Amino acid sequence: MSTPIGNLEDITYRAIRTLGEVDIIAAEDTRQTLKLLNHYNIKKKLVACHEHNEQEAAKGLIDQMQQGQNVALVSDGGAPLVSDPGFRLVSMAVEQGLEAVPIPGACAAIAGLCGAGLPTDRFMFCGFLPKKKGKLREALESVKDVQATLIFYESPKRVLKVIEGMTEVLGDRKAVLAREITKIHEEFLRGALSEIAKELNSREGVKGECTLIVGGSEDQTPDFGSLENVIKAEVAKGELSASKLSAKLAKQFGIEKKKVYAMVLAAKDAE
């Protein structure tokens, strides 16, 4: 069942009632879940079920359910299984013919999408991206041509590096960084990926849970005014040939290389 992602009021009546009725609560972090239970004065048996013990914990929980016990599965916040533990437990329960009942509620991906202001008719949840640079690039290349709004989860320590990687692979797309959703310091940073990166670079650090929403491939309108300014600056530096500079900026802005090449040559002639 879904639990609050920050504000403890973001939980349904049904979820509170169910937590009070089940025999066991399987939690990603029992300490975190205990805060929620104490807030609503619910006292139940807690069992840890996280990414490091899920396979083993699931077997014990399945045994309990086969003996007639009711188990509620929760993560630290939001919907379990959505970039959180729980898939193995639910999969095993279904295989054993046990009933798996979803109890909907808060989810950072959907909350972030609803507040982003980007298209919502089609979207793709991508979860957390790989940490290694090569794998990160591969993952971004795989969604580069997806014609839907892309939703990512990211840690505050890595989000700036990820945004810079996105700019290189996807181009300088429209995006929104939703930080600390539903919490006191909730913030939505909107703009091109490069603009969000610039804002984050101006800060001492980034804190809080981050949801990154990025426009799909069909939603991008090339900003030729911005591109022209970048070309002038790069040509003035004189560090790259016209061909290499065109290739770099075509990828960054998501524009056909020959169009960028023509703009680079025009800038060189003007200089």
Image (cartoon, rainbow, N blue to C red):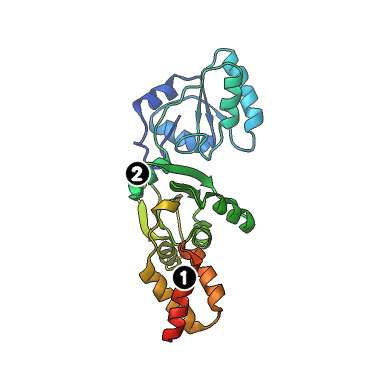
Q: Amino acid at mark 2?
A: Cys
Q: Is residue 143 above or below residue 82?
A: below
Q: Position of residue 59 (x, y in %)?
A: 64, 24
Most distant residue in the top direction: 68
Q: Nearer the viewer, residue 91 or 9?
A: 91
Indicate which disc, 1 or 2, sits on the residue closer to the N terminus: 2
Q: Quadrant of the C terminus?
A: bottom left
- Between marks 1 and 2, how big is the CA–CA gap? 35 Å
Tell me, yes or no, if residue 182 can be seen here: no
Q: Position of residue 209 (x, y in %)?
A: 46, 49
Quarter of the image where one finds residue 8: top left
Near mark 1 (Cα within 10 A), the count class, few <14, some 14-19 or many ≥20, is many
Most distant residue in the bottom direction: 271
Tell me, yes or no, if residue 166 can be seen here: yes
Instruction: Look at 40% across and 64% down and name the residue there.
Output: 195
Q: Is residue 220 above or below residue 183?
A: below
Q: Quadrant of the N terminus?
A: top left
Give residue 210's mark: none
Dot 2 falls on a residue whose secondary structure is helix
Q: Position of residue 62 (x, y in %)?
A: 60, 20
Q: Position of residue 85 (x, y in %)?
A: 56, 35
Q: Nearer the viewer, residue 84 or 221?
A: 221
Q: Nearer the viewer, residue 166 or 65?
A: 166
Residue with the mark numbered 1: 260
Most distant residue in the right direction: 56
Q: Is residue 268 above or below residue 163?
A: below
| Mark whose residue sits in front, 1 or 2 | 1
Quarter of the image where one finds residue 110: top left
Dot 1 falls on a residue whose secondary structure is helix
Instruction: Look at 53% across and 59% down and name the residue there.
Output: 169
Give residue 114's mark: 2
